[in-house]
Image (cartoon, grey):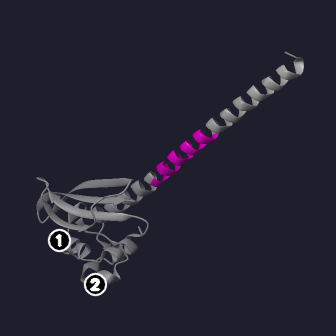
């Protein structure tokens, strides 16, 4: 072989390896970028779910008697006392329209499900939709509901 032919074969091999490495690098970049975006979305949902469940089980909401006129509620809170839920507030929240509740909770980009269950997992009260998304968060809190121990569950998904 001549020197010119060897140099062009070497150049072709180097160019092929370079293109292959760039393709692998771009593929890995896209994969990690997607994982990072999913992680950020998951953390946003987790933060929102914990914030909402804290508000439900620790505060009476704003105004404190919002259950008398649910459309006037600024912040939903279901508590009479810390982790002691008011059945009137819980029923008022469960009877609010799905879209109105999402708007007041500031979760328009997500779907939710709210449930109160007894310790045997019998559903005492429910509203919202069953989780059916790719990313979901379920927060459970032990509470007292109608003078019995219960579990308040709030789920968000996208």
Q: Which residue is mark 1?
A: 87
- Mark 1: few, some, or many residues within 10 Å (few <14, many ≥20)? some
| Place of residue 67 in the rendered image (x, y in percent of width and height, measured from the top left) | 25, 79
Residues in magenta? 26-41
Distance from Cα at disc 1 to Cα at disc 2: 15 Å
Q: Is residue 89 above or below residue 1?
A: below
Asked if residue 79 can be seen in this view, the reply is no
Q: Give the quarter of the image for residue 4.
A: top right
Q: Is residue 122 left or right of residue 102?
A: left
Residue 35 colored in magenta in the image: yes
Q: Nearer the viewer, residue 34 or 147?
A: 34
| Place of residue 13 in the rendered image (x, y in percent of width and height, measured from the top left) | 74, 26
Q: Nearer the viewer, residue 22 or 118?
A: 22
Q: Quadrant of the C terminus?
A: bottom left
Q: Secondary structure at mark 1?
A: helix
Q: Is residue 66 left or right of residue 44?
A: left
Q: Is residue 150 left or right of residue 128?
A: left
Tags 1 and 2 touching, CB below 8 Å: no
| Place of residue 1 in the rendered image (x, y in percent of width and height, measured from the top left) | 84, 15
Q: Secondary structure at mark 2?
A: loop
Q: Earlier in the sequence, mark 1 or mark 2?
A: 2
Q: Give the quarter of the image for residue 14.
A: top right
Main SS of the magenta part reads helix
Q: Nearer the viewer, residue 153 or 16?
A: 16
Q: Give the quarter of the image for residue 17.
A: top right
- Which mark is drawn over residue 69? 2
């Amino acid at each position: 072989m001549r020197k010119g032919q060897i140099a062009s074969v070497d150049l072709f091999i180097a160019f092929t390896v370079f293109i292959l490495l760039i393709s692998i690098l771009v593929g890995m970049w896209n994969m990690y970028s997607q994982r990072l975006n999913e992680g950020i979305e998951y953390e946003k949902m987790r933060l929102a779910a914990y914030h909402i469940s804290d508000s439900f089980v620790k505060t009476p909401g704003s105004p404190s008697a919002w259950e008398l006129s649910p459309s006037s509620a600024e912040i939903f809170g279901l508590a009479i006392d810390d982790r002691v839920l008011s059945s009137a507030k819980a029923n008022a929240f469960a009877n609010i329209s799905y879209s109105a509740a999402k708007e007041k909770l500031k979760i328009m980009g997500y779907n939710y499900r709210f449930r109160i269950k007894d310790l045997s997992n019998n559903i005492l009260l429910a509203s919202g939709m069953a989780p059916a998304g790719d990313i979901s968060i379920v927060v459970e809190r032990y509470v007292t509901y109608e003078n019995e121990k219960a579990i308040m569950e709030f789920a968000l998904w996208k």
